Image: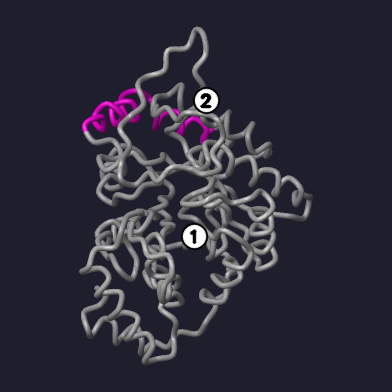
Amino acid sequence: MRASETRTVGRTGLTVTALGMGTAAMGGLYAPVSAQASLEALEAAWQAGIRYFDSAPMYGLGRSEHLLGHFLREKAGPDVSFTVSTKVGRLMARERPGRDLPPAPPKNALDSGWHNGLPFREVFDYSYDAIMRSFDDSGQRTGLERLDLLFVHDIGSVTHGDAQAAHWSALTKGGGFRALEELKAAGLIGGFGLGVNEAAIVLDAMNETALDCTLLAGRHTLLEQNALDLLEKAQQAGMGIMIGGVFNSGILAAGPGGHRRFNYQDVPEAVARRVDALTAACARFGVPLSAAAIQYPLRHPAVTAVLIGPRDAGQVRQNVQWFEQDVPAELWQTLEREGLVA
């Protein structure tokens, strides 16, 4: 399997490379990352043939969209093609006279903060007007002629808790989905869907509108296979699925003494034991755990692409090497037989 292999996203006609690059790290996720390191990482991805890039206003509170836009504008040309997705649901705002911002929501367990963040505050808003404004704002931050895919970001109870019902109402009854439908009908985007950590909310959204694609962080990895119902329904509906978080926040790529986090938090003992068992099984076939982790989601036919979130060029090249490494079918059979994957 090659990182540059192209695949069609659902019924949109858009193509993405099998390996895509997410840009959360460029916003300073977990630690500061310089602009130079971010641009070098993007260049390494480009040289490897990666042509699908995903961002979000949340990532560095606008910083990642700025950096990605700068990089891609320099690459743009009549014979150059790439696919970009970003997200809606958060607006970037500042306190100022005449503006009454809502109280900042309680910090949730999945939000680790931004070490390189710009001086803005995120405001959740999934209404019609906010979706349209978010589309405009992302266009201005990136400076790109076109944004191909828009994902509704972090709609769900894990992020919003008691506020979920109000946000869901804004997205459904308040016209958020209608705004996305209108942008697509006007040809301003190629498709839309959800960008979430929760599989169940995607099934709910599929009952409200025709989603073109979904970016699911985790939930279908070597450590978790709790989204199989969603994957089956997506395949039946012709909806593309992208899987991010293939290393479950680092635990599947850490190695001895490495950065061991699981789903943005400290690693539970039971998860650590399972990682050790997966590592041992992979070692019997001479396959690094990370290579198995980055390739595993694409074994399901509903999955269109996987996304990585490297911090620098070295990590990009390492991820590409893992993605393109030969993995024998016997390894997958062993993991299933030993009950380590579904």
Residue at the spot 52% in from the left edge and 81% down from the top edge: 325
Q: Main secondary structure of the magenta part?
A: helix
Element type at mark 1: strand
Q: Amino acid at mark 1?
A: Leu
The residue where tag 1 is placed is 307
Q: Quadrant of residue 113?
A: top left
The stretch of residues the image draws in magenta is: 162-185
Where is 286 relative to 83, above or below? below
Residue at the spot 52% in from the left edge and 74% down from the top edge: 323
Q: Position of residue 41 (x, y in %)?
A: 64, 59
Disc 1 or 2, which lies upstream in sequence?
2
The mark tally for this picture is 2
Q: Quadrant of residue 315?
A: bottom right
Q: What is the spatial separation of the Cα atoms under label 1 and label 2, in whole angstroms? A: 26 Å
Q: Is residue 86 left or right of residue 245?
A: right
Q: Amino acid at mark 2?
A: Arg
